[in-house]
Amino acid sequence: MTLNDHPEPPPIDNETPPKELKITNLTSAIEALLRNPNSLFKALLEKQNLILPLILLTVFSMGLLGLVFGTYSTGHQLWAAPLKIIGGFFMAALICFPSLYIFSCLADSPLRFRGISAAYLCFLALIGLLVIAFAPILWIFTQSSNSLPFVGFLALTVWALSFAMAGKLLRKISHTMHSGRQIYLWLFLFLIVTLQMSTALRPLLGPTTTFLPQEKKFFLTHWSQSLIESSVIER
């Protein structure tokens, strides 16, 4: 045998499915959600004791995001912004669930009501985990920048990234393989609803004298007017 006669290493099997994780508590549920979401999805179908911890995790994450928003202007926004974001997010989630169920049925998904509910909870919980991950970055800019348009843009970027990554998970575990157009359409509607909800509960950033707005606005109209007002103030 010569020096060049070493046996070649076996090829790496990229198709090996991820190892099933044993899920017994919130910590293991979080790990499963990040490493192998299908394990958590299956566990939710079997164990109802995981539902409440995941809901509380989502509540905590939205509250943390609201607290970060509140630190931009402090004052009563420190409690108002978390309350608005928690309430607005779960209101949007409740509003959008019926359409998710109908769209999944139209897409010929094999999941029934319970399975769609479990997939939806995984989707919401992953948004919450991603918001927690991005919160320190957002907090740095709320404390170091006075530019409301920039901080608002950064907040929208954080939300868009969290939503996109969680949406990918939802598409995988909902098994809508026969027609993906319905689930894409639903994700778009969910995003629009959350953006409009943020406008209906404005302001989430910046000082305010009222808890809720006194007039109705479309979110694109609100953004454009806010940019114009900010540019006038900076001049």
Image: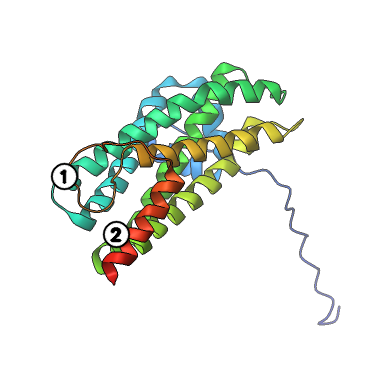
Q: Is residue 42 left or right of residue 232?
A: right
Q: Which amino acid does label 1 sit on?
A: Thr
Q: Measure how far apart labels 2 and 1 are at the Cα level.
A: 23 Å
Of tags 2 and 1, which is closer to the observer? 1
Instruction: Please tell me which residue lies in front, 60 or 34.
Output: 60
- Is 59 placed above or below 145 here? above
Determine whether the residue tagged by mark 2 lies in a helix, strand or loop.
helix
Which residue position holds label 1? 209
Q: Give the quadrant of residue 180.
A: top right
The residue positioned 37% from the left and 60% from the top of the image is 228
Q: Quadrant of the C terminus?
A: bottom left
Alpha-carbon neighbours of circle 1 within 10 Å: few (<14), some, or many (≥20)? few
Judge whether residue 145 can be spotted in this image: no
Q: In this view, does 15 lie to the left or right of 153?
A: right
**Image coords of residue 94 (percent x, y):** 43, 25
Alpha-carbon neighbours of circle 2 within 10 Å: few (<14), some, or many (≥20)? some
Instruction: Please tell me which residue lies in front, 163 or 217.
Output: 217
Which residue position holds label 2? 139
The residue positioned 26% from the left and 36% from the top of the image is 214
